[in-house]
Image (cartoon, rainbow, N blue to C red):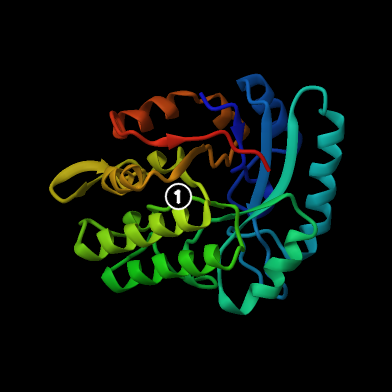
Amino acid sequence: MQKFNYHTHTKRCGHAFGDDEQFVKAAISAGYTTLGFSDHVPFPGKKCPGGHMDYEELPEYLASIRKLAVKYSDKINIKVGFEIEFYDEYMEYYESLRKVSDFLLLGQHNEALYINDYCFFCDDEDVMIYALSIKKAIDGKFADLICHPDYFMLGRRDWTEACEKASRIICETSIKNDIPIEVNLNGIRHGKFLIDGQMQYAYPYRRFWEIAAEYGCKVVYGVDAHLPMTFLDKTRYDTVNEVLVDLPLNYIDLTF
């Protein structure tokens, strides 16, 4: 089991549950030594119930995690950041978040703000938009880790030449910028789907990770915790590792 996790949500996003301190206590109980909170970033003047925290909650979020970092400093190293989605019109906003947080994760879900979630449907054109958005974000130094890079497969039931090309763009971007990619431990909650004639998880999706291994991308696990008890569910590592068995992935220790 990996001893650090930077992908942790809070109840402010509307689809995670539990108090901040419960996440901390659960992570300590599970044996983690570093815990990074990275709730879905709020956007000024925009509301998305059940998707992101409200912008007005941002100061309280930062203060709460900083307070817990002091309280539990003898037991666990706590950092605070955000999971962002990259959109051109918010580049200055992302830069401002750098000044108040320890790190930024890139978790691209939508083609535009609150529009066209890739998990609902993702054709070949969509998957290229997805990959190029990630490339632009990472080339622009807007994030420190690429979360669930194979998320696009949740909206597909086949692997095509476009998926191959998009995956190589993402992996080449990771290598070029020395930015790790995340094996997400939460994708398995969706269950298996009939993809290219086989029942398999959409993410992690093995073909993507075969490409990542080919490139030698730096890799970390991400718990993507939406419940405190998720930290205690260590079987997720076993399930995901069965998908990725025998792949020579370049796992690293990560510190922000």
Q: Is residue 110 visible?
A: no
Q: In which quarter of the image is residue 20?
A: top right
Is residue 130 toward the left or the right of residue 247 in the image?
right
| Residue shown at the point (82%, 36%) measured from the top left | 68
Counting from the top left corner in percent of width and height, residue 125 is at 30, 74
Counting from the top left corner in percent of width and height, residue 114 is at 53, 70
Q: Residue furthest left?
A: 197
Counting from the top left corner in percent of width and height, residue 167 is at 33, 57
Q: Which quadrant does the C terminus fall into?
A: top right
| Residue shown at the point (28%, 29%) measured from the top left | 246
Provide the secondary structure element on which disc 1 rests: loop
Q: Mark 1 points at which residue?
A: 148
Label count reads 1
Q: Camera-side residue: 125 or 134?
A: 134
Counting from the top left corner in percent of width and height, residue 57 is at 78, 58
* Amino acid type of the residue that numbered disc 1 sits on in the rendered structure: His
The crowd level at tag 1 (other Cα within 10 Å; few <14, some 14-19, many 20+) is: many
Q: Is residue 174 visible?
A: yes
Q: Camera-side residue: 41 or 219?
A: 219
Q: Quadrant of residue 184?
A: top left
Q: Camera-side residue: 26 or 216?
A: 216
| Residue shown at the point (64%, 74%) measured from the top left | 90
Relative to 146, does residue 161 appear above or below in the rendering?
Answer: below
Relative to 204, does residue 45 appear above or below in the rendering?
Answer: below
Q: Which residue lies furthest to the bottom in this view?
A: 89
Q: Residue furthest front?
A: 176
Is residue 216 toward the left or the right of residue 33 in the image?
left
Q: Camera-side residue: 49 or 256?
A: 256
| Residue shown at the point (33%, 33%) measured from the top left | 248
Relative to 125, does residue 186 appear above or below in the rendering?
Answer: above
Q: In which quarter of the image is residue 239?
A: top left
